[in-house]
Image (cartoon, rainbow, N blue to C red):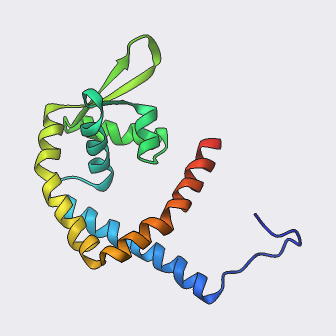
Amino acid sequence: MPPEDGEPRWLSEDEQDTWRAALNLHKLLLRQLDRDLHDDGLGGHDYEILVGLSEAPDHRMRMTELADSTSQSRSRLSHQITRMEARHLVRREECEGDKRGTWAVLTDVGMATIERVAPRHVESVRRHFIDQLTPAQQDEIRTAYQPIIEYLRKIRNRD
């Protein structure tokens, strides 16, 4: 929220360094994790969807719920699911009793894929992120990020 006088609240040098460090970490880490998943023919969004469906009851989620859990627009998720359907990783099913609702369902091929890829992905996360931090630093990150995550989820749900 801008100050009452309308002037921007410019970031201090330390704030700017903090912001840029967060952005750079995010970009570089996701790019590396994506690169590692690429060897298995997946992208980060593919993997995130496969994980969500593999952990969901009956390996299915409503498309709207899946979009929310992956922080994707419904349109973007629909295109992503179409690409994944072509590779037989997922399928869509109509929601019984709700003509507008659609399920995204993990297929046997999708489950076999996540079971094959997950161990390598976890190793990639460990190597490129977790192992670079002490347990105390991991705790600091969780503690520092949690209020921001809660705030952003709250304002997203208002939209």
Q: 137 left or right of 57?
A: right
Determine the residue positioned at 50% across, 69% down. Answer: 144
Determine the residue positioned at 40% across, 74% down. Answer: 25
Residue 109, percent across and down?
Answer: 13, 36
Residue 38, percent across and down?
Answer: 20, 59
Q: Quadrant of residue 113?
A: top left
Residue 110, percent across and down?
Answer: 18, 38
Determine the residue positioned at 53% across, 85% down. Answer: 17
Q: Nearer the viewer, residue 26 or 84?
A: 26
Q: 108 left or right of 60?
A: left
Is residue 38 something one can see in this rendering?
A: no
For the image shown, how many numbered marks are present on the structure?
0
Give the answer, above or below, for where 65 lies relative to 100.
below
Q: Nearer the viewer, residue 159 or 143?
A: 143
Is residue 126 something one can see in this rendering?
A: yes
Q: 125 left or right of 72?
A: left
Residue 28, percent across and down?
Answer: 35, 73
Determine the residue positioned at 17% across, 64% down. Answer: 123
Q: Residue furthest bottom?
A: 13
Give the answer, above or below, for where 2 lies relative to 41.
below
Q: Residue furthest top?
A: 97
Give the answer, above or below, for where 22 lies relative to 149.
below
Quadrant of the image containing the C terminus: top right
Quadrant of the image containing the N terminus: bottom right
